Image (tube, helix red, strand yellow):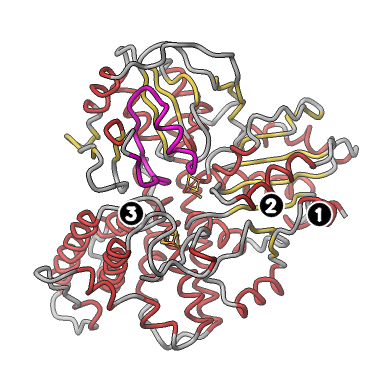
Amino acid sequence: MFCEQCEQTASGNGCHQWGACGKSPEVNAVQDLLVYCLRGLASVVLKAKEAAISTREADIFTCESLFATMTNVNFDQRRFTDYIQRCLEIRENLKAQLGSVDWSALANYQPNFNESLVSQGQEVSLELIEKVQDLDIFSLKLTAIYGVKGLASYTFHAQELGQEDDSVYQVIQETLAAIDRSDLNLNDWVAICLKVGAANLRAMELLDQGHTETYGHPIPTNVPLNPRLGKAILVSGHDIKQLAALLAQTANTGITVYTHGELLPAHGYPKLKEKYPHLYGHYGTAWQNQTKEFAKFPGAIVLTTNCLMPPHENYESKLFTLGPVGYAHINRLETVDGAIDFSPVIAKAQSLPGFTEISEPRQVMVGFAHNTVLSVADTVVDALKQGKIRHFFLVGGCDGAKPDRNYYTEFVEQVPEDCIVLTLACGKFRFFDKQLGSIEGLPRLMDLGQCNDAYSAIKIALGLANAFNVSVNEIPLSLIISWYEQKAIAVLLTLLHLGMQNIRLGPTLPAFISPNVLKFLSDTYHLQPITTPAKDLADCLG
Ligand code: FSO
Ligand code: SF4
């Protein structure tokens, strides 16, 4: 097998025997086969778009199935077989509408379902076909594919909330179709990657609109970290819409709903909180701690998106997945009349003890999305001008199990008292409950939301640049980013598209970035690896 799409890739050099995430070589091969078929579908979709034939079904399908191939989303080989079959059905349906066209071999590719899809997937591994030809183009093709996976996940969430823009689908399909081309040079591939970043900015804007138009702008909200007595359901992942659907179905059941991981920021949405008082508190920390945290949780658990880890026997019977998420033998929630039916989760929660003991009250504050922060832009600008705030640090991104991620905790601990830390995504769980005080009434630690809310960080940076009438690289803001999976790659491409300089990335640099591509990123954008908290802090403040 070959996969190097995430930060945890084996020895920083690609997973070749078995995925460090728990993905088997067989699942990896059928994922490769699916992506290969999606690339063929993309060329047909582009022709259909030119001919003004509706491609919405194909576009949404492409997003969902690419989402399923992201790290820690779906480990179920049968689901990928279903996705491949569906991909070919959609492709042939579009071809039939287009009439006689001279299709490429990729657009006509037909796997043999009577033989092993695993060996057919191994034959179309991108590494096998491309790496030998040109390492730098291979590196940029991987960057584009992985970035498109992240973009597809944001686009999938946005369309769930009724927000779509055909220009985003166009970029996803163009990028997938371009992988097959051998006539593009390095500059062309850099441009393709930056275009993915631009489309991702639009996708994140759509997702932000979807969230805020449906659930209101997040407001500063205290979230209990201690449970309350009674039956309980824990919801993890990122999908606010599915959380809302669960809340609707559990209203008046007496069950308390807790968020886990990246769903913590859901508590900041006023329309969710007002409507569903049984959305009570947060339980646990980041994704890599789930095997311990899920085992202890005394109720049912729903995984709405990444990051799913291979479940342990001691909690798998109370774990449920939905949408693109999956694991063989784990309960899967079905869609009934267009909505997920959570009744098996409710029945499971009722059969489990729930919380029978209370603990010391603790809480954290969420809800510092762009609307809240920019509503006090004048205070921020005054405090900056008067030197009361010296610098902003965005310390955010993904968490992971490696010990070198302690850098981010130590960094936040060492940030001087006249500086403010903005954070987002699951990396914050290393320091989210620290009491850092405030400056001029502004908390020194502000949680902007999920990785899906990276748009907020960008809006705040652009808003401050606008208030000072300078470029975004001239405001006193440093980006200290931790990455893990492909959404982080999409966001990084967005930041590069915006021309953001001096991003510090860690805990290690992506394995798929070749030395020449890294040199380009470092020369053009001054993208750099993290070093030590003390050195990086001194450099940023210097
Ligand atoms: Fe974390 Fe996982 Fe949100 Fe990622 S839960 S690591 S960038 O998939 O999604 O931040
Ligand atoms: Fe390895 Fe990451 Fe790929 Fe899993 S997703 S196989 S850990 S590179």
**Above-or-below relation of 398 to 318:** below
How far apart marks 3 and 2 lie (CA) works out to 28 Å
Q: Residues within 10 Å of mark 3 (few under 14, many from 20)?
A: many
- Residue nearest the viewer, comparing 428 with 460: 428
Is residue 47 visible from the viewing direction of this image?
A: no
Q: CA distance from mark 3 to mark 1?
A: 38 Å
Residue shown at 23% from the left, 37% from the top: 333
x, y percent for residue 229: 43, 11
- Disc on res. 68: 3
Q: In the rendered structure, does residue 320 fall within the stretch colored magenta?
A: no
- Quadrant (top left, top right, bottom left, bottom right) of the N terminus: bottom left
Q: Amino acid at mark 3?
A: Ala
Query: Measured along the vertical axis of the image, is residue 450 above or below residue 81?
Result: above
Residue that label 2 marks = 480
Upstream in sequence: badge 3 or badge 2:
3
Please provide percent x and percent y for residue 477: 75, 49
Q: Secondary structure at mark 1?
A: helix
Task: Verify whether residue 305 appears in magenta.
Answer: yes
Q: Which residue is mark 1?
A: 540
Q: Quadrant of the C terminus?
A: bottom right
Disc 1 marks a residue whose amino acid type is: Cys
Please give the range of residues in magenta: 287-312
Q: Is residue 72 visible?
A: yes
Query: x and y percent of residue 110 in the render?
Result: 16, 75
